[in-house]
Image (cartoon, rainbow, N blue to C red):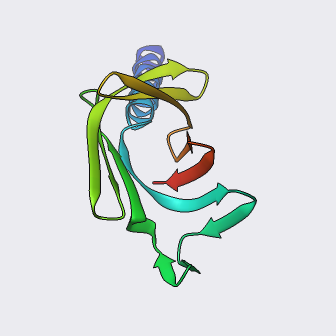
Amino acid sequence: MKKTKVFLTSMLISIFMLCMLLLTACGGIPGTYYLESMEANGMHIEAGEPYMGVTIDEEYIVVEIENDGSFSMSMSGSMSFKGTWKDLGDGTIELTVDGDPLVCECDGDTLVMDMDGAKVTLKK
């Protein structure tokens, strides 16, 4: 009887740990990423810093990655793009808009894009 109780308790704990691991994995890449910093032409700008008389805040660039394989990106509140994304593995994803792919680094908390030579870093 005692062995059965210990076995059942061990099984329940194992199942609980497996569920927690799976839930953690499910929360990976999808989410909303906000501008953290930009680097271009030797300049580094952090979100919240002024640049050419304008303060570049976190919402200057926002990327929303959905579980269904779609994503949207808004830039400076005036431009927006919609497309699809896929996980390429090894910490990279591919964002595609109108057939044009952009490979980005993504670890589930940080998204790093190279946009025409400018390195853009976004955080959840």
Dividing the picture into quadrants, the one containing residue 60 is bottom left
Q: Residue at x 41, y 22 (%)?
A: 5
Q: Residue at x 28, y 32 (%)?
A: 83
- In this rendering, position of residue 51 left or right of residue 12: right
Q: Residue at x 27, y 62 (%)?
A: 78
- In this rendering, position of residue 82 left or right of residue 12: left
Q: Horizontal and vertical percent for residue 82?
A: 25, 38
Q: Horizontal and vertical percent for residue 24?
A: 44, 36
Dividing the picture into quadrants, the one containing residue 90 is top right
Q: Nearer the viewer, residue 87 or 81?
A: 81
Q: Residue at x 62, y 48 (%)?
A: 119
Residue 124 vs 116, above or below: the answer is: below
Q: Quadrant of the N terminus?
A: top left
Q: Nearer the viewer, residue 96 or 17?
A: 96
Q: Nearer the viewer, residue 8 or 69?
A: 69
Residue 20 vs 109, above or below: the answer is: above
Dividing the picture into quadrants, the one containing residue 39 is bottom right
Q: Horizontal and vertical percent for residue 13?
A: 45, 29
